[in-house]
Amino acid sequence: MAGNHPYFNLPDFTQPSPPSTPASLPPHQRCRPSDATKGLLVALLGGGLPAGFVGPFSRMAYQASRLPSLELLICRCLFHLPIALLLKVRGDPLLGPPDVRGRACLHALLNVLSIGCAYSAVQVVPAGNAATVRKGSSTVCSALLALCLESQGLSGYDWCGLLGSTLGLIIIVGPGLGTLQEGTTGLYTALGYVLAFLGGLALSLGLLVYRSLDFPSCLPTVAFLFGLVGLVGSVPGLFILQTPVLPSDPLSWSCVGAVGILALVSFVCVSYAVTKAHPALVCAVLHSEVVVALMLQYYVLYETVAPSDIMGAGVVLGSIAIITAQNLSCEREGQVEE
């Protein structure tokens, strides 16, 4: 009878209870990066960091064998031509569909102009300064063009970051423009900064044109067109405007090969990123190129990095942090039922 008493039917606390495990989220419900976050990360790691080596390596090739900028551009375009094999295997037209062929060629032409201006600028301006001016101008121009042409508004944080980029640009360029009164050297310095600015403007226009392209195999098509248009325009210009040089030292060939590979990787990553995030934000993240270029300028090229360069680069990077902080987010496809 005692065993049937309610006080004798209590749970047995002497046995260990099974541990309570929180319900794990299914894979489709877990937090994952948003498209904008993916685009910015690809632009940072695959676009900005490799591109930071391009300017210093281009300057090393010029210092070693006086390699002209158009010849370096031709070598880079050669790395894009094998993409035609991929398009042939997939059965896609090399020049893209007929209805968008004109815009695809325009995108390639703008990128060729941008790269040509950049390579010419680094021959007369320190690589870090040229990279900063080009990326800063591309960021500001992308924001203004997207606002005017695509009616894409920017938040207050974005505008604050863009103003910071402009301020950093002024800090870096200002001391260099002070040499305008010192003769031919100052004139070449000013011309280098102008070329870097025009390269950024052409880059921002090219990114907007690429966002308007929407067809299968868009990325490999524009990559191949860049190489084709670059060769068509650079080969005649090399023999008319400059003197071809055949490098004889291994350093020049190594720099040319590194420039071609790194630039191709950066081109592909930036083209992908601009389809996921705002072009102004992509250009802002690409300012990571400035940090790499300034480090190589000081430690590899043994060129002086002025305090104004460091201060301006710091302001630019701070503005990048402001722009990208609010765009780093994740998204869920489902919610957990409690």
Image (cartoon, grey):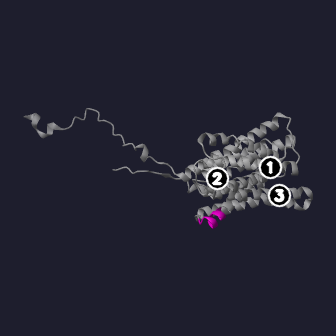
Residue 315 makes an appearance in the image: no
Q: What residue is pinned by disc 1?
A: 234
Relative depth, front residue between 9 and 259: 259
Q: Main secondary structure of the magenta part?
A: helix
Q: What residue is pinned by disc 2?
A: 285
Residue 86 in the image, given as x and y percentages of width and height: 63, 40
Callout 2–callout 1 Cβ contact below 8 Å: no
Q: Magenta segment range?
A: 143-151
**What is the CA distance from the residue labelled 2 to the residue labelled 3?**
25 Å
User: Which element is circle 2 on?
Assistant: helix
Above or below, comparing residue 247 to residue 230 in the picture: above
Q: Residue 176 carries which label?
A: 3
The amino acid on which the numbered mark 2 sits, given as a three-letter code, is Val
Say which residue appears at 33% left-offset and 40% top-offset.
20
User: Which element is circle 3 on?
Assistant: helix
Taking the magenta stretch, the answer to whether it contains residue 144 is yes
In front: label 2 or label 1: 1
Residue 111 in the image, given as x and y percentages of width and height: 72, 53
The amino acid on which the numbered mark 1 sits, given as a three-letter code, is Ser
Relative depth, front residue between 276 and 210: 210
**What is the CA distance from the residue labelled 2 to the residue labelled 1?**
29 Å
- 263 sits left or right of 4 in the view: right
